[in-house]
Image (tube, helix red, strand yellow):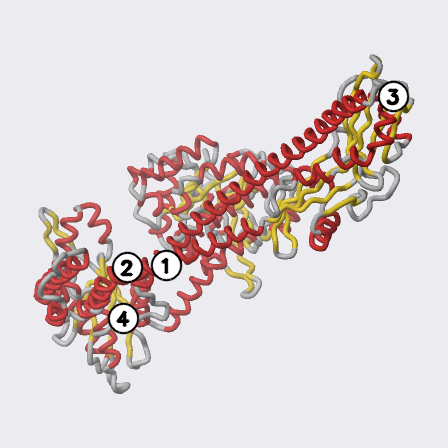
Amino acid sequence: MIVNHPDRFLSIKWKLLIAVILILTLVGGVICTLAYQQLLNQQKMLLEAQRDKLAQSLSFSMNTAVEHSLQAAMQLGFVANAKGDDGAEGYQLLLAENWPDVQLYWDLKGFGLYQLDGERLAHAGEPHSQDDLRWLLQSEASFELTSRVVCVEDCVIQVLVPTLVNSRPHLFFFESALTEVISHFRTDKSIELAVLGAQSGNAEPGPLWGRHLYSISNRPSSFALLRHMADSYSWQQISMGDGVYNYQDNHWAVWSFPLDKVENAPAIVVLMSLGQWQQMLSTFQLGMVVTLLVGLILAAGLVMLVAWSPVISLARHANLLPLLADHDFAGVRASLPSKPSLFPDEVDLIHLATRQLADNMQGMENEVDEYTHELERLAMLDTLTGLPNKAMLHHELQTAIACIASKEDCVVLMFLDLDEFKRINDTLGHIQGDELLKIVAARLTNSVREMDTVFRQGGDEFLILLRQVHDEQEVSNVIHRIFSALQHPVVLGSHKLIVTTSIGLAYCNSSRLSAEELIQHADLAMYQAKSAGRSNYRVFSEEMLHQANNRLMIEQSIGTAINEEQLVLFLQPIVELPSGRLRGFEALIRWFHPERGLIMPGEFIPDIENSEAIIEVGNYVIRKASELIARLNSAGWDDLYIAVNLSAKHFLAADLLTVVRQEVEAQQISAGSLVLEVTEESVIEQVELAMAAMASLKALGVRIAIDDFGTGYSSLSYLKQLPFDLLKIDRCFTANVLDGEADTHIITTVIELAHNLGREVVAEGIETQQQAECLSCQRCELGQGYYFSRPLDVASVFVVLQEIEETRLWPISQAPQPKLVRQGS
């Protein structure tokens, strides 16, 4: 099998080649950059050295010109004395007779002999201006050799040399052209020079920084460069002299040197071509690039040479992995090289590991094949009972449903749940509970037909699949055998038990029904059977599914009902017997659904009784009842109480005490005005928790009522320990108080029991005056029922309270007569 490369596949050899090229390029680039930067630094140093050299050369040339003037002064003095007169006349005679020779020999443009006060004694050549005389007068006090450069029509160097004439100090004034200075200064043909005068203070800056150009070497090319520099850069930038300028694809160094030490002196501008240096830089760059390319090519060749064989081997190895996945171990061995290379590397280790992996996988595959059938068998069986498990159930159900060929063919699923198994398991322990499940599984297996299958879904739940059912009698026979088999006692250690079960049946005669739906139908029927009592069975109907959907709807929308206050309290009065004096109310909840209208408690409370929603509803009723008590107190009825029914789950909730305390404190009411009713059965089921809850509520001041007394299986020993306040007789006894001696005797006994425990009694369901009189004769303190009033909305209750504010007697057509009350009641 050959591996298909993905669209973005890139071989390792190319990755290595690209990586090496990138690394070499990066390293070469860094080296080239550093070398190039070093050359630039070297160029800068050389340029600075050249500038310093030029500055020294200019200074030397200027000093030479000044010394030349000093020598001329000394020789002219000898010549003048040789004329026979050591005064000013000797110099005048010398200049008159020999000025051309003196001018030519000393390269002078002008000469003068001056007294210290500026009086001229002798002169030849260019006339001296007033500026010259001012400079002379300013310099005479120093009696030192003084020079300056002046540019008028051209630039000249002027030197004042102190001398003695007739033993008196005088000044020689020499004026020479700058030609000799420039000729000594320009020693390199690559250098071009330009002489600029001082910057005019009044004139606007001209094309050459506001300075007049007096001379320039190689004018055709140098002037254009000088003009470009003047247009592009300031005189200050040129004076700093640390830049390299590009002009017409050539690089230049441009410096300016002042020709005098005074401010704004004439200057000489040096233009130095750097073409040779730039050519050297370009040659270096080209060499580095060529060297880098050659290095890259050599490195790439070396990488390809070294990596080619291992990469090809790895590529072949990649094709071995699919062979391993396909369990083609022989193909893997055939594709691997039989011998390692001369110099083994990691690739050879991979080949060796692959061969070992193929051998190990083949051995493991043989072992897996041996265990597969055993695991498949165990996966479908329950480990405790040996019956087929839930996974097998779904498989068999799907097969059985798919095999339904006609309406006469039918499949029946039975869902069994043992009654009170949790109590047995908790009492005897899990070991005995598991033993009981094994016995039940064996009895169920013996109770069905050969074509039927018993499954254990988990816990104490069993399912039985009845195949090829043609009439209901076959199902009835199986159910009868199951109940009969379970009637025999089960002996577990020293205990003998009778186990019963609740059975739900679901019929299926259509292949369109799924296995999950059939299990759901049987489960719903089983819960109906369990609700009807132990050892019972029920057949699934669409009404059950409707009830289940209704229960789901209620669970989902009860939160919205609480938030939007769709739940409303109705109040049924509780009155004293026989006086009819109002003592309190029982709060009864009504759900005004926005779509379904009025929903009575019996239609939604059972559906949420085992969920957390029942606690939310109970807390809501406590809050509303507390608000009503506060309203009653404000209206002057602070002696009334309101009773609230609580489910067993809510009564045993950990936060009930906190909720009640918060509501009592928030409404600022007496805790004794709130009565919490809990059923007898829920209290007895968890009597220790119930006693703890009652004790904490009693400590807060809340009163407790035992509701529906007489309908459960109360233990009198537990009952006398419970700290309750009121005992409520269920309406089933009240309804028959006039008809049967048994119910009358029960009521009498209950009342006596409550009185002996110091508790008050409330009779529920009083509908006639005769019932009220009978209960009053038996010393029942309180009563409620339709005889006094049906449950009323809060507004109607307050209307009645206004009417009976003085008498405090609840209005009824006939009230029990006081004469029927026994003495001492």
Please indicate, yes or no, whether residue 737 appears anywhere in the rendered image.
Answer: no
Please indicate, yes or no, whether residue 810 appears anywhere in the rendered image.
Answer: yes
Q: Position of residue 181 (x, y in %)?
A: 70, 37
Give the mark nearest the N terminus, 3 or 4. Answer: 3
Q: Dot 2: what SS?
A: helix
Please give the residue where the numbered disc 1 appears in the rendered image: 294
Please give the residue where the numbered disc 3 appears in the rendered image: 88
> What numbered label is drawn on residue 505?
4
Please give the residue where the numbered disc 2 appears in the rendered image: 302
781 or 415: nearer the eye? 415
Q: In screen coordinates, is 795 left or right of 499?
A: right
Q: Nearer the viewer, mark 2 or mark 1?
A: 1
Contact, CB < 8 Å: mark 4 with mark 1?
no
Q: Vertical placement of 42 versus 334: above or below?
A: above
Q: Position of residue 743 (x, y in %)?
A: 36, 51
Disc 2 marks which amino acid? Leu
Mark 4 residue crowding within 10 angstroms, few (<14) / some (14–19) / many (20+):
many
